[in-house]
Image (cartoon, coloured by chain):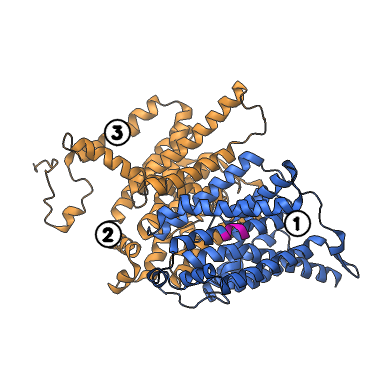
Amino acid sequence: MRKIHLQSCGNFHERYDQELTIFSTDFGRLWAGIGLLILFTIVPLLASPYMMYVFNMIGIAAIAAIGLNILIGFTGQISLGHGAFFGVGAYAGAIFATALGLPMILSVPAAGLVTAGVGMIFGIPSGRLKGLYLTIATLAGQFIIEYLLIHWESLTKGTMGITLPPADLLGLSVSGDTGFYYIIFIALSGTVWIAINLMRTRCGRAFIAIRDNDRAAEGMGIPIFPYKLLSFGISSFYAGFAGALWSFYMGSITAEPFNLGLSVEYIAMVIIGGMGSISGSIFGAVFITLLNESLRFMTEILMNTGIITQSGLNVAPLREFVFGLAIVLFILIEPRGLAEVWRIIRSSFRLWPFSY
Amino acid sequence: MDFFMQLLIGGLSVGFLYGLSAMGFVMIFKSSSVLNFAHGELLAIGAYFFLALSTWANLSIPLSFLLALGGCFVLGLLVERVFLRPLIGEPLIFVIMLTVGLAAMFKGLILLIWGGNLYTYPDFLPKILEIRWGLIRIPPVYGTTLIIGTLFLTLFGLFFKFSSQGIYMRSVADNQRAALSLGVNVKRVFALSWAIAALVAGMSGMVLGIINGVNVHNLSAIGLKVFPVVILGGLDSIGGAIIGGIIIGLLETFTGGYLSPSLRDVVPYIVLVLILLIKPYGLFGLKEIERV
């Protein structure tokens, strides 16, 4: 039996791969296992249907946010079109399921691949120009995709939307929040595992080098353009994958939700969670989804108690304001996001009573 | 032919407005190389200031125009001081994200105060400014726009050419470090460029409000249309912004008139992608773009 790794009292790393380990102690490994066990056995038993719905939304948002974080946090490129790419994935999944009759297990990854292709088209300008121009190109992508989703009627059925067939997985029919809960969280675990390990490979290290200093990276022999494009493709794949899951979960889709507001929502998740941290994207997804739900809840209460009598009062402006405020405050006060807050809390416990 | 002329004139005036709106954007980019995603919201804030002063506070039109401009100027100073000053020296990605956040914040705030309805200003422009030429009728707003726009352009041209602050601003735009080492107060230049940009944005917002009515969704959409305009004209060229604006405006109205009205709003972005692929520094931009 191998030696159990416990918290060492200093940094005794001698080889590079020791720095790269995901779990530095066996405690971490144990906690991750326990966490997964709770997630897959106890939570579905205890949670109410509404809670399951919230969990599912968090799971889907987290997959897309991880994708955006690979692009923003690890490669240093901003995308303002993530909401539209999510929409491309949703539509691609729906079209594969209805027109081609593919089962869910094939159409969701296929939708991811289609989205990756679409994303890479808008990533091409990044090959000619530095940073900011990709942001502008993705802004254009957002509007062009939104237009196509509504007006390419032969493919997307325009404003009618598409209704999906009931989902099934290898012959088992998947229905209800609990069924999707398992699928979404298995997918989330898989995508997290891939993303974490991706950042330890040659390719992930190239992304980080490009983010930190693109000139130095090029000087060290990293071909910038292919890697930027690859990062953009992976990020779009995540968005498309999440979008396709979302469309199966919702059962019917229209082009409405995939607007610039959704893109800003994903950016908010990445910033609030913490750029360049996979766990941060999950924190961000939890934060934003709970914020969404609690704002809706609050306005409902205010409406019922009669404090707000305006029947036309919409949650949307308040939500937009709070999102903007959250982005601004996090950038000004804690630019490394919730992941950093969590790290500080954890290390202050670990170092207690000699924390500084 | 009449239809063509109508479209031509419509396109020219819309394009001139786009150019005017883009001017403030270019000013911020030139002095601090920040892409301001909150530009549309600055337009909207100007328009709503004017609305509040002229219809709710019942002030006279010229007074409320000047007060609204002053309000925008102060707002620009405040935004720079509160939100952007702490980020000097931070990676540019944070600054851009911050403007995205500011955009959402301002838009939400405006929607909370005024709602998403369309407001119109009282009709105050004299009829003399209306131009009739055969069947073509140009409403007085466009004449006024042209006058105000040219006035502002000349004023800013003179400001940048001759005033000391304008020369400081140009020096910072040219080389920030060199300007700093020669004793230019770069922080003040940043503050001033945000203030002037907000003022110009507010002015174009008011003019847009006179023409189309005041609605935050429309105005923030125009704020995003600034991107095709400035990329076409060259990101750091104020003259290029005007010409880019006119080209985009013409393209939009002709697409709307001859092809399909729904395509109208997407054409600028298609052009944007093409320009980025073919001639990324735009028509008049500096060609010192790194290919990394």
Work out which quarter of the rendered image holds the N terminus of chain B and state it.
bottom right
> Which mark lies nearer to you, 1 or 2?
1
Q: Disc 3 residue type?
A: Leu
Q: Disc 1 residue type?
A: Ile
Crowd class of label 1 (few under 14; some 14 to 19; many from 20; radius 10 Å): some
Q: Disc 2 residue type?
A: Thr
**What is the x, y in percent for residue A183?**
41, 40
Distance from the alpha carbon under mark 2 to that under mark 3: 28 Å
Q: Which mark is residue A201?
A: 2
Q: Is residue B105 above or below residue A17?
A: above
**Would residue A9 appear left or right of A162 to someone viewing this image?**
left
Q: Are marks 2 and 3 on the same chain?
A: yes
Crowd class of label 2 (few under 14; some 14 to 19; many from 20; radius 10 Å): few
The quarter of the picture where residue A199 lies is: bottom left
Part of the protein shown in magenta: B196-200
Q: In the picture, one chain is orange; tell me its letter.
A: A
Helix, strand or loop at label 3? It is helix
Q: Earlier in the sequence, mark 2 or mark 3?
A: 3
Q: Which mark is residue B75?
A: none
At horizontal 61% and vertical 47% (from top left) the residue drawn is: A256
Helix, strand or loop at label 2? It is loop
What residue is pinned by disc 3?
A37
Q: Chain of mark 2?
A: A
What residue is pinned by disc 1?
B211
**Would residue B292 appear left or right of B61 to someone viewing this image?**
left
